[in-house]
Image (tube, helix red, strand yellow):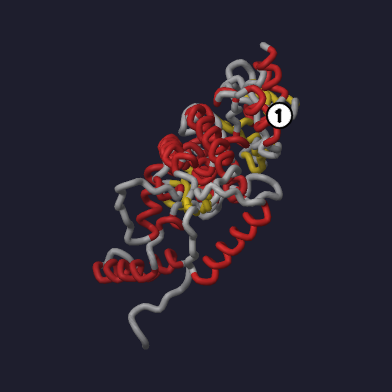
């Protein structure tokens, strides 16, 4: 390792080989660790560091607004949904403990949120079974969110947690639908986005005056005269909206050009990051020039989000939990997307009427859908 590499490592940049994960090649990054912005600025100014010296880890990536928006949309939306055990396509009347609350003292929404967070950024993540029921089925797990806790062998298998051996039979591994994970796939664009943000921030911290009163008369003004001129001119504009400029005094408007703030470059990087996250642009609040797609209702937008982005995460989680070491044979775990795709009440009841008139459904079925008893057939 060279001298500059050693300095970069000490300041929080390029990780040492011994700190690289066996499967991902990325530095273990705890979500609880802090960013050292002073180190970033020092290294950039002192060494003239290129983007390759900007460490790509979860913390740095989350400082990029587009990445944060993508992560929040994917992870928090999935966290709102419930897991259900189904047998023969029908929801089982008795749901396993693991699907209702997997971690002690932690809501299932939080467990799902951080599980999907790990699947977004990294190649895989793990639940480790900590307790089983009398039949041997898992009921409590330890969700390995802080990757510094995980010890892997040369083939990327989890063998220790907090340096304590783990029984392979207790490891539930989930693999990312993004393959190597967003940090690896989008590494270059994350580096470029951080570099562009730093450059734009530098431009914003060195503003130009909005208006310059340029003296072309050749008669210099001392400090007091200059201050009086500026105060009077500013006060006149504030009071009347206009001001008088004598001969020999030229008004020059200024402002930061879009090129100075790198607006076009940052927009292009944002679109590239959205594509690598498999996100529809609207979900990350990013506009695409010329795009005119609109939606009639909330459920249509959510169906697109599910089809383009969320479904692979649902499959990765539900598919793993459906395997025989977690779920009895003949049963499957599914993600209930009803909260996202449920039509508005008017549409639902119009559909119910069609079903009742056609004899396809009955009152009991409608009551099950609505979760409450209904009065059908008008007043008695």
Q: Nearer the viewer, residue 228 or 355?
A: 228
Relative height, residue 165 to residue 131 (above, below): above
Residue 35 lies in quadrant = top right
Q: Is residue 117 left or right of residue 295?
A: right
Residue 40 lies in quadrant = top right
Q: Where is residue 254 shown, x and y percent of the image?
A: 48, 49
Relative height, residue 108 to residue 365 (above, below): above
At horizontal 48% and vertical 71% (from top left) the residue drawn is 372
- Inspect this view and state whether residue 84 appears: no
At horizontal 49% and vertical 59% (from top left) the residue drawn is 246
Mark 1 surroundings within 10 Å by alpha-carbon count, few (fewer than 14), some (14 through 19), many (20 or more):
some
Q: Nearer the viewer, residue 73 or 226?
A: 226
Q: Nearer the viewer, residue 370 or 51?
A: 51
- Inspect this view and state whether residue 12 appears: yes
Residue carrying label 1: 161
Q: Where is residue 266 shown, x and y percent of the image?
A: 46, 39
Relative height, residue 250 to residue 241 (above, below): above
């Amino acid at each position: 390792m060279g001298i500059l590499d050693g300095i970069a490592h000490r300041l929080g940049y390029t990780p040492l080989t011994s700190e690289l994960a066996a499967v991902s090649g990325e530095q273990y990054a705890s979500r609880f660790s802090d960013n050292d912005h002073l180190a970033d600025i020092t290294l950039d100014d002192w060494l003239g560091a290129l983007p390759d010296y900007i460490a790509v880890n979860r913390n740095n990536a989350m400082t990029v607004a587009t990445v944060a928006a993508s992560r929040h949309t994917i992870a928090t939306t999935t966290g709102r949904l419930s897991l259900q055990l189904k047998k023969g396509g029908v929801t089982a009347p008795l749901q396993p403990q693991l699907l209702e609350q997997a971690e002690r003292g932690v809501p299932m929404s939080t467990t799902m949120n951080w599980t999907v967070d790990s699947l977004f950024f990294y190649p895989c993540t793990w639940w480790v079974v900590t307790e089983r029921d009398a039949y041997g089925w898992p009921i409590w797990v330890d969700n390995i969110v802080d990757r510094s806790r995980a010890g892997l062998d040369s083939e990327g298998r989890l063998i220790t947690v907090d340096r304590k051996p783990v029984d392979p039979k207790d490891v539930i591994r989930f693999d990312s639908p993004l393959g190597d994970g967003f940090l690896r796939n989008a590494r270059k664009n994350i580096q470029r986005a951080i570099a562009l943000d730093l450059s734009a921030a530098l431009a914003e911290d060195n503003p130009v005056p909005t208006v310059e009163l340029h003296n072309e008369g050749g008669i210099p003004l001392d400090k007091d005269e200059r201050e009086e001129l500026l105060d009077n001119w500013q006060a006149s504009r504030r009071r009347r909206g206009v001001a008088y400029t004598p001969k020999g005094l030229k008004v020059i408007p200024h402002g930061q050009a879009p090129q100075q703030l790198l607006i076009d470059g940052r927009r292009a990087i944002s679109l590239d990051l959205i594509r690598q996250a498999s996100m529809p642009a609207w979900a990350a609040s990013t506009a695409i020039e010329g795009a005119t797609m609109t939606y009639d209702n909330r459920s249509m937008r959510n169906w697109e989000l599910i089809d383009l982005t969320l479904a692979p995460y649902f499959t990765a989680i539900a598919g793993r939990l459906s395997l025989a070491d977690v779920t009895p044979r003949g049963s499957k775990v599914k993600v209930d997307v009803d909260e996202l795709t449920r039509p508005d009440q008017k549409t639902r009841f119009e559909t119910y009427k069609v079903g009742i008139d056609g004899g396809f459904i009955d009152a009991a079925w409608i009551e099950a859908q609505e979760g409450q008893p209904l009065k059908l057939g008008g007043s008695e």
